[in-house]
Structure formats: structure tokens, C-alpha cells
């Protein structure tokens, strides 16, 4: 069988890799991925062919992975977090129409939203929305509209790609939209390098978040109107108290 695994590696820690992902990595002859993410699979690199492409070459990377699998080599496409959350599972499945002989299995991983939430406490106990602030593939006005709708719906927000070198003001602009719907002292938090060396986190208010400098290795959480700080943890009540 010609097999391609699209693997979510989790946020970073070896103990955050699922056993299912581990089995698929062990079964693979070729590891394919963006250089930084391949590092997540360093324990599996010995004796395996490594195919890496730079950050912007996503489609080329997918094609190379599908070609290796079509040659009969069991191949793993490595993604950070979950493969289907801003990962490569989508583009692989789209391109796979040209490779009908390749069997594709998507293997889930712990996405940054869930791993980061656990570091902060329990911010995602109630309805939440995940929005990427990267406008590389989504026009900025669409991102603004989604932020505005999530704000109006009082969703807890989880923001991926909060800042890039080129666009340093995305997070501030996102906070300004949210400030139309919630108060400046709304509980927020960020987690950097989740599960990796140098993991850091901070709880802060929405007003403070507006002034904060974060980077692309950070996931940001904006509380709903009911999110609270309890003993240094960010918690969104599930609502049991009100049920009586
Ligand atoms: N597929 C990945 C997301 C890729 S988009 C996943 O499911 O987690 C890249 C964004 O994800 C980063 O800009 C950051 O906001 C977030 N992210 C991914 N890994 C992270 C980590 N280890 N620590 C903090 N944020 C992370």
C-alpha cells in the first residue's frame, strides 16, 4: 500500500506526542516538513530520508511528500500542533486528487489552543472561537469581520499568528475591535513556546494586551465577559453555579 501520514506532532514536548502519531512516525521511511517542525520529530530522524522545504514552500512540500509516497515509500508529513488546524492536512487532501494511488491518513495532534489553555487554567470551558491574525492567506478585512462577530457573540477568543515581523500592529488592531464589545479589564493571557524550551505565559487585561509585544511563537487568549482570574489562573465559568 502507498501510504502518506499527515501527522499532528503536538505543540513541542515529546510527552505531548500521541501514541498514534508515534506509531505512524515509526512506520515511516521518509519524514517531510518545514525545517523548524522537523525538529519536533528529531527522535525519529535516524535512518530516515528527510525532505525539508522553507516556510513559504507549502505546496511544493505537499507535492514532494505525495511523490515519495507514490514511489512506494511510507511517508510522514510533519505538522506542529494539529495537522488540520492551519496545518497541511487540507492542502495535502486537495492535491491528493492527482495521486489516487496514495492512501492518506490524517493523525490528530494537540493544537496550541488546547495546550496553551491548559497552561493558563481553563479559559475555553465555554464556547470559543479560533482566529488567525495572519493576512497572508486571508484578507485583513475578513479577519476584522470575524473578530467583530466573535466579539458580538461574546466568544472566548484564541488567536493564532498574533504578530509577524512585517505586521506588528495586528494584535493591537484586534484588541481595538474587541474593546467595542467588552471592557478594558477583560481577563486575557498569552502562552509562548508551549511545550518547548523557554515556555512562558502571562495573564493581563485586554487594555494591557493592546500594548503587549508578542511574537509568532505565541498563542493569545481573550476572555469573554464572564472569564475570571482565580488564584492566578484564567477561568471561564461553565455556568454550573447558576444552575443551582
Ligand atoms: N497547526 C498548528 C498551528 C500552526 S499556525 C497547531 O495546531 O497548533 C502557527 C501558530 O500557532 C503560531 O503563530 C502560534 O500562534 C501557534 N502555535 C503553534 N505552536 C505553538 C507553541 N508551541 N506555542 C505557542 N504557540 C504556538
Image (spheres, rainbow, N blue to C red):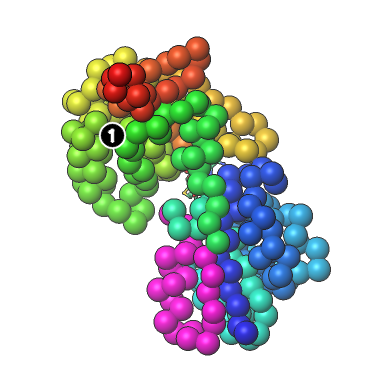
Residue 216: x %, y % from top left: 49, 40
Which residue appears at 54% of the width and 25% of the height?
Answer: 201
> Which span of residues is magenta-colored?
86-106
Which residue appears at 25% of the width and 18% of the height?
Answer: 183
Magenta span has 97?
yes
Disc 1 under 8 Å from ligand 1? The reply is no
> Which quadrant does the C terminus fall into?
top left
Residue 72 image-quadrant placement: bottom right
Residue 122: x %, y % from top left: 46, 28
Nearer to me, 43 or 133: 43
- Residue projecting furthest to the top: 231
Which residue appears at 61% of the width and 31% of the height?
Answer: 199
> Which quadrant does the N terminus fall into?
bottom right
Q: Which type of secondary structure does the marked residue at label 1 adopt?
A: loop
Asked if residue 40 can be seen in this view, the reply is yes
Mark 1 packing: few (<14 Cα in 10 Å), some, or many (20+)?
Answer: many
Q: Count the marks.
A: 1
Magenta span has 9?
no
Residue 95: x %, y % from top left: 43, 76
- Residue projecting furthest to the right: 47
- Indicate whether 145 appears above or below 61: above
Q: Where does label 1 land, which residue?
A: 155
- Indicate whether 119 appears above or below 19: above
Amino acid at each position: 500500500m502507498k501510504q502518506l501520514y499527515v501527522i499532528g506532532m503536538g505543540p513541542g514536548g515529546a510527552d505531548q506526542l500521541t501514541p498514534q502519531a508515534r506509531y505512524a512516525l515509526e512506520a515511516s521511511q521518509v519524514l517531510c516538513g518545514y525545517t523548524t517542525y522537523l525538529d519536533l520529530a528529531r527522535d525519529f530522524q535516524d535512518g530516515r530520508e528527510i525532505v525539508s522545504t522553507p516556510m513559504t514552500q507549502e505546496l511544493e512540500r505537499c507535492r514532494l511528500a505525495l511523490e515519495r509516497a507514490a514511489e512506494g515509500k511510507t511517508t510522514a508529513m510533519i505538522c506542529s500542533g494539529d495537522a488540520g488546524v492551519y496545518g497541511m492536512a487540507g492542502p495535502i487532501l486537495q492535491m491528493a486528487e492527482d495521486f489516487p494511488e496514495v492512501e492518506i491518513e490524517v493523525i490528530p495532534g494537540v493544537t496550541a489552543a488546547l495546550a496553551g489553555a491548559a497552561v493558563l487554567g481553563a479559559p475555553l470551558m465555554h464556547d470559543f472561537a479560533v482566529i488567525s491574525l495572519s493576512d497572508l492567506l486571508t484578507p485583513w478585512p475578513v479577519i476584522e469581520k470575524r473578530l467583530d462577530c466573535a466579539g458580538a457573540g461574546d466568544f472566548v477568543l484564541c488567536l493564532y499568528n498574533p504578530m509577524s515581523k512585517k505586521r506588528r500592529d495586528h494584535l493591537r488592531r484586534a484588541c481595538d475591535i474587541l474593546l467595542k464589545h467588552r471592557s478594558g479589564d477583560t481577563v486575557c493571557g498569552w502562552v509562548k513556546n508551549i511545550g518547548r524550551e523557554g515556555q512562558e505565559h502571562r495573564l493581563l487585561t485586554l487594555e494591557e494586551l493592546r500594548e503587549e509585544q508578542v511574537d509568532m511563537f505565541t498563542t493569545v487568549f481573550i476572555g469573554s465577559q464572564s472569564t475570571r482570574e482565580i488564584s492566578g489562573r484564567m477561568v471561564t465559568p461553565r455556568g454550573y453555579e447558576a444552575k443551582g
